[in-house]
Amino acid sequence: MTAPLLQTRNLRKHYGDSTVVDDVSFAIAPGECLGIIGPNGAGKTTTLRMCLGLTAPDGGSIHYQPASGPLLQMPQDAQAIKAEIGVVTQFDSLDPDFSCEENLRVFGRYFGLGRSVMDERAPRLLEFAALSHKAQARPGELSGGMRRRLSLARALVNAPRLLLLDEPTTGLDPQARHLMWERLQQLLQAGTSILLTTHFMDEAERLCARLLVLDHGRKIAEGTPRALIAEHLEPEVVEAYGAGALALAHDSALQALAARTEVSGETVFFYTREARPLLDALLQHPHLRTLHRPANLEDLFLKLTGRQIRE
């Protein structure tokens, strides 16, 4: 069995009386994408910061297996570990005074990469980020999607074995998001490992081989997207909305046809193992609009963490 590239055991972090991360353990295999999902305040970013050595854990351990040599531990071996990882944070830290190419070259110096190495690497990274035509443009002249791709290219300057991405596509339009996903898929196919936090369930399902679900700092579920859906949810969902929809949540005849019923806003969600009888019964309410679909990660997220907004 292949040794994990990154492994955490029983991570804990407190701020005053508040426990932000509570006994969280996980491992990432070489070439694997592990996603961390959860509501705001669940502990996702703090977990990532501990893995980066930016926040010291109050308990537990973080180990990294380098390309060669003995196992390393964070934060004791932070410098050696950071030499082998790349990071894309929620908000870019690109230098506004440098061009796209200069941002890459300056960042390369932090890893001791000389001019000849960057002469070869910078154009290749700009091409990977679909920014060759913007090599001399400054970040302020780029769209949000371009800046995120430049941040990704910069994170790849040191040819990292592991990428840590904190909500990498937040704020991007659908086209920019899909291009970012395409680039991340290319990295995974090339063997790069990724630790990803995201609020987009379609992103998690598209990219992640496994998911870790956090809530109130604790791990409440872990597994492949499909396995988690099968374990926690009924396979089919019928949504009903429109005038009078909320009254359906209390209709005993309809409830008998569903394993579980939930209400969110003006929509009633019927979770069932066999949707046809339920859909036939809903035909008696022609004024309603219905949507029949398979259960997905968003349903899983809401079942495990609740529908109440976290501020």
Image (cartoon, rainbow, N blue to C red):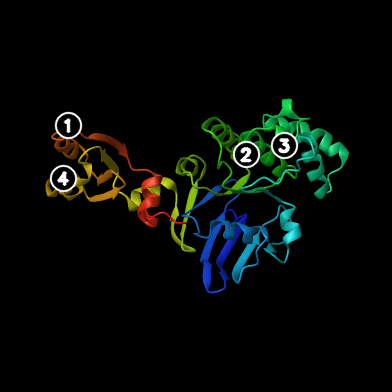
Give percent across and percent down for residue 35: 52, 50
Name the front one of labels 3 and 4: 3
Per the image, label 2 sits on a secondary structure element best described as helix
Residue under label 3: 139
- Amino acid, disc 3: Pro
Whether residue 69 can be seen here: no
**Residue furthest front as drawn:** 243
Circle 1 SS class = loop
C-alpha separation, residue under disc 2 versus residue under disc 1: 49 Å
Tag 2: amino acid: Leu
Query: Which residue is pictured at 22% across the width and 39% down the height?
Result: 275
Label 4, on which residue? Answer: 254
The answer for how far apart the CA atoms under marks 3 and 2 are is: 23 Å
Residue at 21 percent across and 35 percent down: it is 288
Q: Earlier in the sequence, mark 4 or mark 1?
A: 4
| Label 1, residues with CA under 10 Å away: few <14, some 14-19, many ≥20 | few
The residue labelled by disc 1 is 286
Q: Residue 187 shows which numbered tag?
A: 2
* Quadrant in the picture for residue 132: top right
Q: Residues within 10 Å of mark 2 (few under 14, many from 20)?
A: some
Residue 93, numbered label: none
Judged by depth in the image, the label closer to the viewer, 4 or 1, is: 1
Q: Secondary structure at mark 4?
A: helix
Q: Are marks 3 and 2 in contact (CB under 8 Å)?
A: no
Pointer 2 or 4: first along the chain? 2
Q: Quadrant of residue 5?
A: bottom right
